[in-house]
Amino acid sequence: MATDPALREGAARLVADLPPAPAVWCSGLRKRYGRRTAVADVSFTVGRGEVVGLLGPNGAGKTSVIKMLLGLVHPDGGEALLLGRPTAEPAARARVGYLPELFRYQPWLTPAEVLALHVRLAGLAVPEAEQRERLATVGLAGRAHDRLGGFSKGMQQRLGLAVALVARPELVVLDEPTSALDPLGRADVRDVVLALRAQGVAVLLNSHLIGEVERVCDRVVILDRGRVAAAGTLAELLGQRELRLHLTDVPAAAAARLAAAGPVEREGDWYVLALPADHDEGAVPDLVRDLAALGARVHAVEPARITLEERLLGILRAGQSADHGSPS
Ligand SMILES: Nc1ncnc2c1ncn2[C@@H]1O[C@H](COP(=O)(O)OP(=O)(O)OP(=O)(O)O)[C@@H](O)[C@H]1O
């Protein structure tokens, strides 16, 4: 069938004007190893320039999902696209940097040689100065020409991060990037992730260090037994803000005023009030004024918010008790 060149051009313009495909898109991913289901049903998206944390207990399926996304493990079901291309296409992975959970580089090579090798494998021309910069980013500038045989685990992990960054990726997948790092190294990785986001590079981060995820991630996907147990922005997941009040001599009218403000839990003289998500700015000062006017003695008022760790534990425990309660 002959196609009209004007029509073809118009279609090409339309496609060029579309927003870029997400960095990661997956739907209904499934994987079994023998009789064990590692991944039952996983769908999520990582937008361009977005930092998404993958959380979950041991064996939840995080590494299996990452390997399916990268085309290293063949899924039994579902679909995945990397930067808009099917993961099975090698071209899909050309602009993806990956730091695997377990890896070992050849001990006779130097960091400079490892980076040069990965640049060649990626088929890119990255100048040596830029490769040296990547080593400096991960704190290995002074060790560029030392043999890896004498490197500590943490230094190898730093090199792994440099490898993931060297070929100018548009998406970086980090599987437990800080497991061997000291606190300074962890802070360095945080800075690297934030710098990547500032450059518009998307990051998928699998880490058991929840505080780390809470500090750098825009969104979190929580996996439990091969399924997405919860997903959302930190504001969505941790949305409920709490107010801790230290009160004594609380008359019934003040207790009623407090209860009218939202659900309250009492621990001795401390009252923990869950503020409604849509509370306005005046709600807290109005409450404190009313409590005092009604005769309560107000010793302290502290804002509080549940941590991601508390939320994660709540989700996982709720999943467990739902399972125990359901008929088998
Ligand atoms: N190659 C494999 N062969 C057999 N079983 C596997 C294989 N890889 C993973 N599994 C199983 O699949 C399940 C999910 O494992 P996976 O490594 O994806 O979990 P994870 O969430 O990354 O765990 P962790 O936090 O401990 O690294 C586990 O029960 C694991 O034993």
Image (cartoon, rainbow, N blue to C red):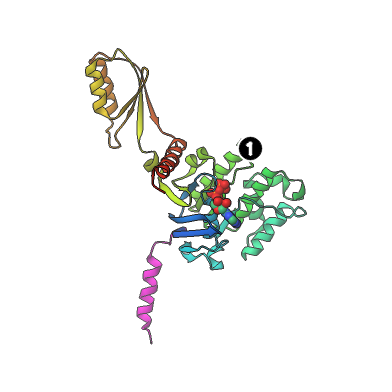
Q: What residue is at 65 percent from the left and 64 percent from the top?
A: 121
State whether residue 290 is above or below residue 320. above
- Residue 140 location, x and y as percent? 68, 46
- Residue 260 location, x and y as percent? 23, 27
Q: Residue furthest toward the front?
A: 328
Q: Residue furthest toward the bottom?
A: 1
Q: Is residue 282 left or right of residue 34?
A: left
Graded by Cα atoms within 10 Å as few (under 14), some (14 to 19) or many (20 or more), the crowding at tag 1 reads few
Q: Nearer the viewer, residue 137 or 30?
A: 30
* Mark 1 vs ligand 1: CB below 8 Å: no
Q: What residue is at 38 percent from the left and 82 percent from the top?
A: 5
Q: Is residue 240 left or right of residue 96?
A: left
Q: What residue is at 60 percent from the left and 43 percent from the top?
A: 178
State whether residue 36 is above or below residue 299. below
User: Magenta residues?
Assistant: 1-23
Total tally of numbered discs in the picture:
1
- Whether residue 133 is visible to the viewer of this picture, yes or no, is no
Quadrant of the image occupied by residue 109: bottom right
Q: Is residue 291 magenta?
A: no
Quadrant of the image occupied by residue 289: top left
Residue at mark 1: 182
Quadrant of the image occupied by residue 2: bottom left
- Residue 1 location, x and y as percent? 38, 87
Q: Secondary structure at mark 1?
A: loop
Residue type pointed to by label 1:
Asp
- Whether residue 5 is visible to the viewer of this picture, yes or no, is yes
- Residue 101 location, x and y as percent? 61, 50
Q: Nearer the viewer, residue 48 or 26?
A: 26
